[in-house]
Image (spheres, rainbow, N blue to C red):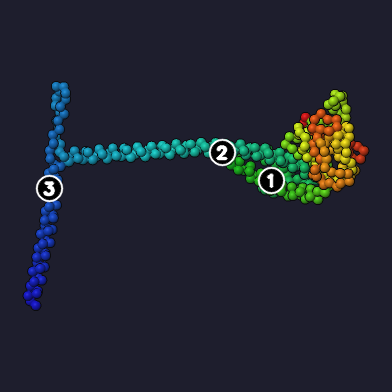
Amino acid sequence: MPRTQRKVKKFEKRFANKVTNKTSSFFKSFGMFFVRAFKLFDSKLTIMVVPHSHGKVINFQTNVFAITLGFLISIGVISSFVYFNRHSMASKTEISNLMSQNRETLASLDQLRDENANLFKAAKRFQTSLSQSLSLLGIQQVESSSDTSLNNGDLSSLFNSKEITTGSARELADIKELTSYLESAVDPIEQIGKMIKTQQALFTEIPSICPLKSPNLHVSMAFGPNLHPLTNQWYIHKGIDFSTYRSGDAVMATASGQVVNVGFDSNYGNFVIIKHNHGIYTRYAHLSNYRVKKGQLVEQGTIIGYVGNTGISTGPHLHYEVHIGSDVVDPAKYVNVKLSK
């Protein structure tokens, strides 16, 4: 037992000596490194500047530490310059992009203001048309329930109001005012729809639609006094001539009724006459052919024939007449057409 203890103590003593020696050697080496580094950086250098001419030679003394420090400072300054220069270029690019976006935004804003102005022009026309329609139908005018209510139920206060705001705030206020008006206009428009729905049967019993549908449709001769295309003499034209510059376009019944006569006439060519309620008759002449027969019941919009050039005619067209009893009336009073030649 004592022998074992002596061995352990010897081992501990050797281990402690080794650790002490290693530590001492490390610090000694570390100290020598700093000494050598100090001696290296403290080494004296002489820098001479010798001019090509016979001028005076310039020399000055320094050490490695000063040169190394100056080199590191130079590298740091150059690196900082490069970094900040690149950062500045990136900032300039970003500012340029922001300015471009700002110009595009301003252009879009100007376009939005123009569209806003067009919107209010259209709203003003809508207000005038709606007010006239409501007045004719005996429906109460639109009244806004907003705090900035519109005078007399129309847009007069909107279009005549003093400009107390500018820019986008003005446009926003106008749009809010227009929204308030349109919301108030819903009820009378619904009343118009209900009225039209209740009178739908009446609209189908009177010649209220155009007998032709075509993008090329125009009125080649209006109702009333006109020069005859063949005799060049003044006469009373008893209908409206519709032309599409071609034959074959479908001709429709302008109101529901019963076909009372079909046939051919030397003046009217192929023709169809339809009797409607309320003592109204319609005549369709110069047809290329017809597809109804006498006594047949037709609905408004039913195809009864096709545009032609039969009878006394200078070109393919439809001669259309409206009779009330024994009187011949202007069809334009019943059909909303543009009277242009």
Q: Is residue 57 left or right of residue 125?
A: left
The mark total stands at 3
| CA distance separating discs 3 and 1 | 93 Å
Depth check, mark 2 against mark 1: the one in front is: 2
Distance of label 2 from label 1 (alpha carbons): 24 Å
Mark 3 or 1 closer to N-term? 3
Q: Which mark is residue 35?
A: 3
Q: Which mark is residue 32?
A: none
Q: Which residue is mark 2?
A: 109
Q: Give me the residue at 10% from left, 71% from top.
A: 8
Name, please, the residue furthest toward the right.
326
Badge 2 element: helix
Q: Nearer the viewer, residue 339 or 251?
A: 251
Q: Quadrant of residue 236?
A: top right
In the picture of the structure, the residue carrying the numbered disc 1 is: 181
How far apart marks 2 and 3 lie (CA) works out to: 74 Å
Q: Which of the 4 image quadrants contains residue 14? A: bottom left
Q: Residue type at mark 1?
A: Tyr
The quadrant where residue 323 appears: top right
- The answer to whether any part of residue 162 appears in the image is no
Residue at 70% x, 44% y is 150
Farthest residue, direction bottom: 1
Q: Where does the image place residue 233, in percent across and percent down from the top left?
A: 87, 24
> Is disc 1 placed on a helix, strand or loop?
helix
